[in-house]
Amino acid sequence: MSADPPATLRCPTCGRTVALEIPSRPASFPFCSSRCRLQDLGAWFDGKHVIPSREPSNGDEPTDRPLG
């Protein structure tokens, strides 16, 4: 019998394979590198990633737009 392949997932930024096993998991997990981790953080700061709001703000209609 052959051993099961190691559990992996894809880096959310570049799509490279990232190991899920503790000994080989990168410090930047779930990203493959610090570079991908920082690119994702920059996207949040630039407003490219948002968490939609479903609650009305100040009595207005619900919005899925980023604040600001």
Image (cartoon, helix red, strand yellow):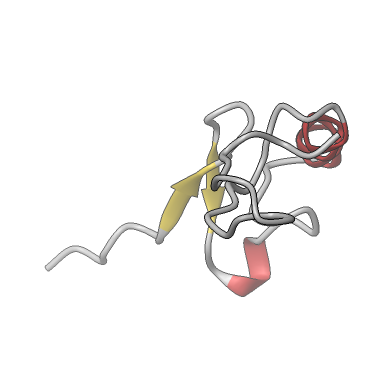
Question: What is the residue that sits farthest to the bottom in this orientation?
Answer: 22
Left or right, 66 with reference to 64: right
The furthest residue to the left: 1
> Taking 55 as reference, is 45 above or below it?
above
Residue 29 against residue 33 in the figure, above or below: below
Q: How many marks?
A: 0
Query: Toward the viewer: 49 or 32?
Result: 49
Q: Which x, y percent locates residue 64?
A: 56, 39
Q: Is residue 5 left or right of residue 66?
A: left
**Residue in the foreground of this view, choosing between 67 and 2:** 67
Q: Residue at x 79, y 41 (%)?
A: 37
The percent coordinates of residue 6 (x first, y second) are 40, 60
Left or right? Give the position of 13 relative to 19.
right
Q: Residue furthest front?
A: 59
Tell me: 1 left or right of 6. left
| Residue 57, quarter of picture | bottom right
- Image x and y of residue 63, in percent: 58, 41
Residue shown at 57%/60% (left/top)?
55
Q: x, y (%) of residue 58?
A: 74, 56
Residue at horizontal 32 percent and vertical 57 percent from the top: 5
Quarter of the image where the N terminus is located: bottom left
Q: Nearer the viewer, residue 32 or 5?
A: 32
2 or 18: nearer the eye?
18
Q: Residue at x 18, y 63 (%)?
A: 2
In the picture shown, does residue 19 fall above or below 45? below
Quadrant location of the C terminus? top right
